Amino acid sequence: MRSCKVYMVLFFCFIAANISAQSNQEAAIKETIAVFFDGLQRGDTLVLKKAISEDLVLQTAFINQQGVSVLRTENSVDFLKSLASKNPSDTWEENLLSYAIQVDGNMAQVWTPYEFYLNKKFSHCGVNSFQLFNDGTVWKIIYIIDTRRKQDCVK
């Protein structure tokens, strides 16, 4: 009976350690995404580079004015160039409404519904889907796809 109690205690310690490690991973992943948005909102490519892979791929899925479904793709070089040429007087604010994080080893996926404001005026809403990779020291965003719409937004 005593050995059964020892195994139960060890089992619960194992579970607690795994939960703690998972919450640490999730905190690190959220921090990477926070650094990304900090760089984006400030127009600071040096900050942004701390959060993204050199091979980052960005895609946007949207319905154009003609009602056609479009998928636009951008690479990290073009993305950083467009950010560097952002009008410094423009303010970009993306409010993330929630996080759904899934982790398997050195890969993570994050789903974040959002609302985007340009110069403090509502612009659009949608969902971001981030794919991240951990190289053993840090989480980096390797892929982002988002949706954009002006209707059916939660406000």
Image (spheres, rainbow, N blue to C red):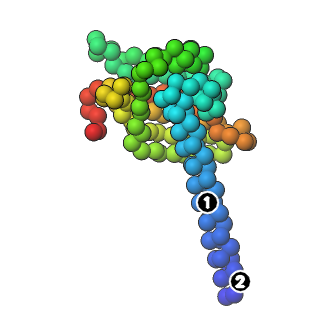
Say what amino acid the circle numbered 2 marks: Ser
Q: Is residue 93 visible?
A: yes
Q: Which residue is mark 2?
A: 3
Q: CA distance from mark 2 to mark 1?
A: 26 Å
- Left or right: where does residue 94 sit relative to residue 154? right
At 26% from the left edge and 32% from the top edge, which residue is drawn?
A: 152
Q: Is residue 75 visible?
A: no
- Of discs 2 and 1, which sits in the foreground? 1
In the rendered image, residue 101, in percent from the top left (x then y), is placed at: 51, 45
At 42% from the left edge and 27% from the top edge, which residue is drawn?
A: 92
Q: Which residue is mark 1?
A: 20
At 64% from the left edge and 56% from the top edge, which residue is drawn?
A: 21
Q: Residues within 10 Å of mark 1 (few under 14, many from 20)?
A: few
Q: Is residue 72 above or below residue 133?
A: above
Q: The N terminus lies in which quarter of the figure?
A: bottom right
In the rendered image, residue 29, in percent from the top left (x then y), is placed at: 58, 43
Q: Is residue 29 above or below residue 8?
A: above
The residue lying toward the viewer, choosing from 63 and 5, is: 63
Q: Residues within 10 Å of mark 2 (few under 14, many from 20)?
A: few
In the rendered image, residue 63, in percent from the top left (x then y), is placed at: 33, 19
